[in-house]
Image: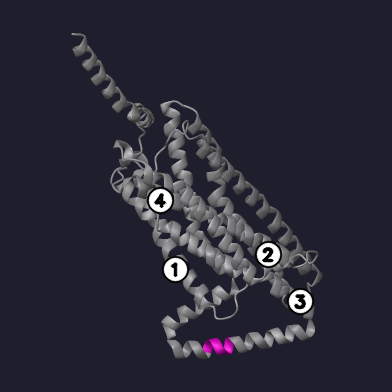
Amino acid sequence: MNKKSSQMMAAASADLLTIIPYKEDFWSNQTNLAINASEIQNNASCPLDENSLSLALIVFYSIIFVVGLVGNIIALFAFLCIHQKRNSIQVYLLNVAVADLLLIFCLPFRILYHVTKNTWMFGLILCKIVGTLFYMNMYISIVLLGLISLDRYVKINKSVKHPKMLTTTRSIHICCVVWALALTGFITVVAPSFFKSEDSNSTMCFHYRNKQNAKTEAILNYIIVIIFWIVFFLLILSYVKIAKNLLKISRKRANFPNAGKYTQTARNSFIVLIIFTICFVPYHVFRFVYITSQLQNPSCYWKEVIHKCNEVMLIFSSFNSCLDPVMYFLMSRSVRKTVFQLICRRIHGDSGLTLESTSEIKLGQYTQERLSTTTPHTSSLKKKSLI
């Protein structure tokens, strides 16, 4: 009897030793399941009425996709057709156009998501890639617009010596650093998705999520919003000073033929600021409220209100990709000239374009030579203030 009992105890011990190595994995899986279950239960207990906005989101995102795609392709083609040596601002504008196109390519996924009644059919990994790519390119555009304002301010302000960083080569290096930092952040955010198992919540994407268990991600979002406001105040200071300098020059040289150009350039200086304010400020004002609510546990009513407001603000941010081509056209004389040449080529043919553009160039050179002989300082200022 004792021998039989000993055998039974030995077998039980062996089974226990076999189970122990998997104990840690078991509780780890249970923790992950508990977190997922909590999120699913939270979404189930607070079903958000996302369908009420679906039609509006489909319409607006479709318009932004078509207009933004056409505008940025034309702008990108215009930048690439500029045969003269590009300056630093043109390098920044070229990179803004690339960032806008990458953001626009994310919009069909959002449109399809709302068409299918908020059902994501492509899995967790692609959801994370599309969502992160959207925000990455939005903030690349924000940083590059800030660099453009800094570049223009230093070039126009006579009291600031032109540092080497404002050369075309340096602006290319700066853009490479911006893209490298953005891609590093993109990989950091997306990489964990490759190691997560799919669950029943994988049919949801672009939805309101609690981040009580992801405080690090929430803190990162706060930091990004703070960076935006730093760039925004930099834009305000830069373009106000640019406008003051140009208007002062315009008053001093009121009798010169091109005095009105300075006033026009001063007005155009606020184009970037106006676009920036319309598209990004509403979203980032509300962003603090949105992130804070994710760390707390608001009622179902406030979750729905916050989620819908965030979707509306995001449309304004996406609208920037439609307005940026307008900014390229108004800010860059080279882009305007290239676009007009492309239009004339379509209408009149290549031969007419060559004759017309040649005579235009000769006339421009003659005018510039006349101005340079009478007002050499004015000519140099014009090169500084205009792209």
Who's the residue at 35% across and 52% down the image? 109
Name the disc covering residue 135, or none: none
Furthest toward the top, the residue is 1
* Spatial separation of the CA atoms under disc 3 and disc 1: 35 Å
Image side of residue 284 versus residue 235, left or right: left
Q: Tell me the kind of residue under disc 4.
A: Ile
How many residues crowd mark 2 within 10 Å: few (<14), some (14–19), many (20+)? many
Which residue is denoted by mark 3 in the rendering? 378
Question: How far apart are labels 2 and 3 at the CA level?
Answer: 17 Å
The residue segment tinted magenta is 356-360
Q: Nearer the viewer, residue 216 or 278?
A: 216
**Identity of the residue drawn at 39% across and 61% down:** 66
The answer to whether 263 appears left or right of 349 in the picture is right
Q: Residues within 10 Å of mark 1 (few under 14, many from 20)?
A: some
Looking at marks 4 and 3 on the same chain, the residue that comes earlier in the sequence is marked by 4
Q: Is residue 99 visible?
A: yes
Identify the residue shown where x is 55% and y is 81%.
83
Chain-order first, disc 3 or disc 1: 1
Amino acid at pointer 3: Thr
- Look at the image and say whether residue 250 sits in the magenta stretch: no
N-term mark: 2 or 3? 2
Q: Residue at x 71, y 71 (%)?
A: 384
Q: Main secondary structure of the magenta part?
A: helix
**Mark carried by residue 73:** 1
Tell me the mark number nearer the camera, choosing from 2 and 4: 4
Q: Secondary structure at mark 1?
A: helix
Reading the image, the residue beneath label 4 is 129
Measured from the top left, where is residue 139 in percent x and y?
Answer: 54, 53
In the image, residue 243 sits, relative to residue 50, either above or below, namely below
| Residue count near mark 3 (Cα–Cα under 10 Å), binned few <14, some 14–19, many ≥20 | some
Query: Which mark is first along the chain, 4 or 2?
Result: 4
Q: Which element carries disc 3, helix, strand or loop?
A: helix
